[in-house]
Amino acid sequence: MKAIQVKQSGGPEVMELVELPVPQPKPNEAVVKIAAAGVNFIDVYNREGRYKVPLPAVLGQEGAGTVSAVGKDVTIKPGDRVAYTGVLGAYAEYAAVPADRLVKIPEGVDERQAGAAMLQGTTAHYLSHDTFPLKKGQTALVHAAAGGVGLLLVQMAHNLGARVIGTVSTEEKAKLAREAGADETILYTQQDFEAETKRLTGGKGVDVVYDSVGKTTFDKGLNVLRPRGMMVLFGGSSGAVAPFDPLVLTQKGSLFLARPSLNHYITTPEELQARAGAVFEMIRKGKLKLRIQHTCPLAQAAQAHRDLEGRKTTGKLLLLP
C-alpha cells in the first residue's frame, strides 16, 4: 500500500511517499481502507518533532473509510463505514485501528464529511460544550475563525446563542466567518485585535478566548478577557507560547487558563461515541456545515502541509488515498 512516512523530524520535505505492507489486524483491531484522511496542525507538530512520535512514522490522526478486515474480539464488521481520530497512520491506503476508537458513520453522512469532522468537529464540540460551556448572551473571541476548527467552532458557538467575534487575515476569510455565524470579524492584518475587541465589547471584554494560534496572540488575548474570563489555548500555529508567571492571571482579573487536548475529552469509548455522535447528528440535520475546500492525493501531502502552514487554506484539507 502507499503511505506518507517520515523517518526524521523536519519540514514538509521529510515526508516520503513509500510502499508498505497492508497491516494485518491484531486482536481488538480493525483494518480500515481509508477513503479520506484529514490534514491537521497536529500532523505538522508530529512531523516537526514538537509532539514526539516514534520514527519512522506514518502521519495522520484522522480518517474515515470502510472496514476491510477485523481481528479477534471485534464487534465491528467488514464493510462497515467508520471514522476515527487520535490514532497515527491515516496518511495511507489502509490503517489498523483499535476497534474501540472507531465510530460508525451514520446514514446521511458521507466518508469525506466524516473524515473532515472527526478531529476538528469533536474539538469544536468539546471547546464549546465542555472546556468553556457557552451560554446564550456570552461573548466569545475565536482566533483563526475561518480555519478548520474555527469555522466549526463559530457555528457551534452561534447555535448555542453566544455572540461571536472572529479574527481572520483576509476579507475573503471574514466573509466565510460571517456566513458561519460570526457577529463581528476583525482583520488582524489591518487592525489591532486587542483594541478592536475592547471597542466591540464597550471595554468589558469577552467571556472566553479560543486561541489556536498561540505565540502571536496569547498575551493580547489575556488583555481582552473580562474579570474571571477564560483563555482556552488549544493550539500553536504561530509557535509555542513562552513560559509565563501564573501571577499574571491574577493581575489581569483572576483569569482562568486552560490548555486542553482532544484526547482527554474522548478518553472512554462511551465519551468518544457520544461526542462524535453529536457532531454527526449536527451534520445530518444541517446545523453544522463543513467546508471541504481542498482535496488532494497522498502524493501531494507535503504541499498540503505547506498550504496549511502558510495560511493558504480555509475550512478542511483532505487527502484522498
Image: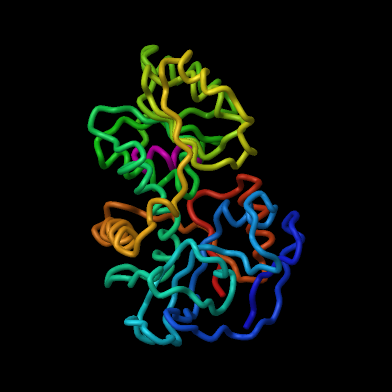
| Colouring method of the image | rainbow
**Image x and y of residue 4, in percent:** 66, 70
Front-lying residue, 182 or 209: 209
* Front residue of 299 and 98: 98
> Is residue 208 rendered to the left or right of residue 19?
left
Observer-nearest of 274 and 308 = 274
Whether residue 285 appears in magenta in the rendering, the answer is: no
Q: Residue 105 location in percent, x, y?
A: 33, 71
Give the residue displayed 61% in from the left and 47% down from the top: 312
Q: Check the image and report above or below for 291 versus 90.
A: above
Judged by its main secondary structure, the magenta piece is helix
In the rendered image, the quadrant that contains the C terminus is: bottom right
Instruction: Residue at 26% x, 42% y: name it.
Output: 159
Give x and y (percent) for residue 185: 44, 30
- Magenta segment: does it hold 176? yes
- From what the image shows, is residue 233 above or below residue 308? above
- Is residue 131 shown left or right of residue 263? left
Horizontal arrangement in the rendering, residue 101 relative to residue 307 (left or right): left
Left or right: residue 314 compared with residue 123: right
| Residue 78 quadrant | bottom left
Q: Which of the 4 image quarters holds residue 178?
A: top left
Q: Which residues are magenta?
A: 173-181
Residue occupying image coordinates x 39% and y 47%: 124
How far across and down, in percent of the image, does residue 27 sit? 45, 83
